[in-house]
Amino acid sequence: MERLKLFFEERAFGVCSRLGEKLNFPIDSIRLFFIYTSFITMGSPVIIYVSMAMMMKIRKYFRKSNNPVLFD
């Protein structure tokens, strides 16, 4: 079970862990919240999760483009 958890944590977007770090809240609780609300509301939090993941990727891209490597 631990190997499965590590597999998904390495390949996931990291939205829940980022929220947990920012809000100083347990990551497992945030993940459970997304899972339960997804079942209750027929998947609408998945849209929020994916949009947050895309925002994180775009921010990372812009940060990388604003700080070019000096030694090419």
Image (cartoon, rainbow, N blue to C red):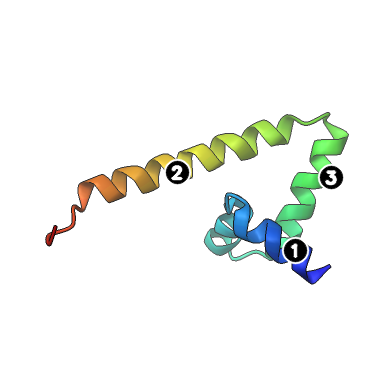
Point out which mark residue 36 bears: 3
Q: Secondary structure at mark 3?
A: helix
Mark 1–mark 3 Cα distance, whole angstroms, equals 18 Å
User: Which image quadrant: the N terminus?
Assistant: bottom right
Q: Residues within 10 Å of mark 3 (few under 14, many from 20)?
A: some
User: Tag 2: residue type?
Assistant: Lys
Query: On the rendered structure, is 56 left or right of 6?
Result: left
Mark 2–mark 1 Cα distance, whole angstroms, equals 22 Å
User: Which image quadrant: the C terminus?
Assistant: bottom left
- What residue sits 38% from the left and 44% below the top? 59
Point out which mark residue 5 bears: 1
Q: Secondary structure at mark 1?
A: helix
User: Tag 3: residue type?
Assistant: Tyr
- What residue sits 21% from the left and 47% below the top? 66
User: Tag 1: residue type?
Assistant: Lys
Is tag 1's residue or tag 3's residue first in the polypeptide sequence?
A: 1
- Quarter-wise, where is residue 8 in the image? bottom right
Q: Nearer the viewer, mark 2 or mark 1?
A: 1
Where does the image place residue 53, in percent across and percent down from the top left? 54, 42
Marker count (numbered): 3
